[in-house]
Image (tube, rainbow, N blue to C red):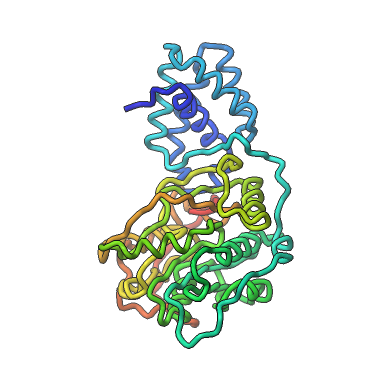
Amino acid sequence: MTPTEPDARARTVTDGLVVAMDEGARRSGLSYWYRSRPWVGAVVDAARSITDAQVRDAVERLLAAPADPAPYWQLRALLADRAEDPVLADLFAVAWTAECNSRIGYHLGAAYRPDEPEITATDLQTTVPGEQLPERGSAPPVLIVVPFRDRTTGGRRARNLLACLRALRDQDYPRERYQVTVVETDVEPTWREVILPYCDRYVFAPRKGSFNKSWTVNVGVVQTGDGAELVSVLDADVLCDRQFLSRNVARFQEPGTGGHLTYRDMFCLDPAASSYSIRARLLEGQPEVSKERLRGFLLRRPPGACVWARTELYLRIGGMDERYEGWGGEDNDFAYRFELEAPLDVHRDDLLHMSHPPSSIMVDGRGINDHIPPLSWPADAAIGRLRPVERPSVSRPAVSVVTGQGR
């Protein structure tokens, strides 16, 4: 059950080496990176033990500059050319084992350019916001909730949010049938005036301390979801294609559909690929982004970045568990509880996740919220209150911080 095509075999090696050595892999998904290290580390060891001097030198060039496309393509071509060499058989076997077990994959498009000019939040504020939701007596049937906080220098996450909102305006789905709610949670509504022209509903949810995605999303659903049949919980860092809404709404016409994830793998773009994607999708008006111009890491089967549900079902299970603080575990818990109640499908759409500064942390190799008992959130919990309900405290272990970008 191993690949036989030469380039496919070569790619398992080069991708494993990049995942092992590129700092971007850790930033893309901290917990997934921890789980992947033994597998991709074995690829590095096997590659460095090759007796062929030409291959070994090419390996070292890639390991020294894993983000550079040139040594990646050079080694990949060399390995493909020698795919039948018995000297490399063990290396290919170890690399395929890593591909079967690693939670992080890699993609480098043939037309990727690392020198792509950066797109900023200011660049996106100069664009036309798009059509506002018309005034009407009843709420639209589709609600998109985007939780948000940005305390970063330069407003990178605000840049991503504006890109996300602009892409949601550029849809082939009837405008009057959906509304977009942004819930900003912080001590002050820092980005309110920037966000307002690009969303239908803005909610400020005052909160100190760590970002709480679960409570923030629940606020959006409870405070603005009355009358909506469907709810989509969407990360502010996701860049949608033009058919995003029409495709996902249509999926609920299939019998036995309580909700779904739109994707299997989350494509965490590097900074250059993020700027290219924003430019292509929004400033050039392309309906979708060509993956040939992209580079980044693939988080395999993470829940939460884009989940759709019937609103009644979302509320029936008590929404998201509001005890989760910071990033980590809340999406898994929601998916587990959801699947106990109703079918949760998984589709294979591309999900482009724009780069941003690290935000997740781990405690001695464990998730910051691992102390919360899974599946313990009561379905009748009071959720989405602008003044959060005090919950019984759950003791946390001492924190030895390692940071990562997302999950």
Viewer-closest of 8 and 223: 8
Of residues 205 and 271, the one nearer the viewer is 271
In this picture, residue 233 sits left or right of residue 336: right
Q: Is residue 274 above or below residue 391?
A: above
> Residue at point 45% right, 85% down?
138
Vertical relation: 52 (above or below) 309: above
Instruction: Indicate the position of residue 285 as horizontal and vertical percent values.
Output: 63, 56
Residue 150 rendering spot, x and y as whole percentages: 62, 65
Question: Which residue is nearer to you in this view: 393 or 27?
Answer: 27
Please name the residue shown 37% across and 67% down the image.
309
Residue 7 to residue 280: above or below: above
Q: Position of residue 88 (x, y in %)?
A: 45, 16
Task: Tell whether 23 sits left or right of 325.
Answer: right
Residue at horizontal 56%, vertical 58%? 237
Q: Is residue 254 visible?
A: yes
Q: Residue furthest bottom?
A: 137
The quadrant of the picture occupied by the N terminus is top left
Relative placement, left or right, of 102 versus 120 is left
- Residue 206 shows in this picture: no
Tag count: 0
30 over 133 or under it: above or below:
above
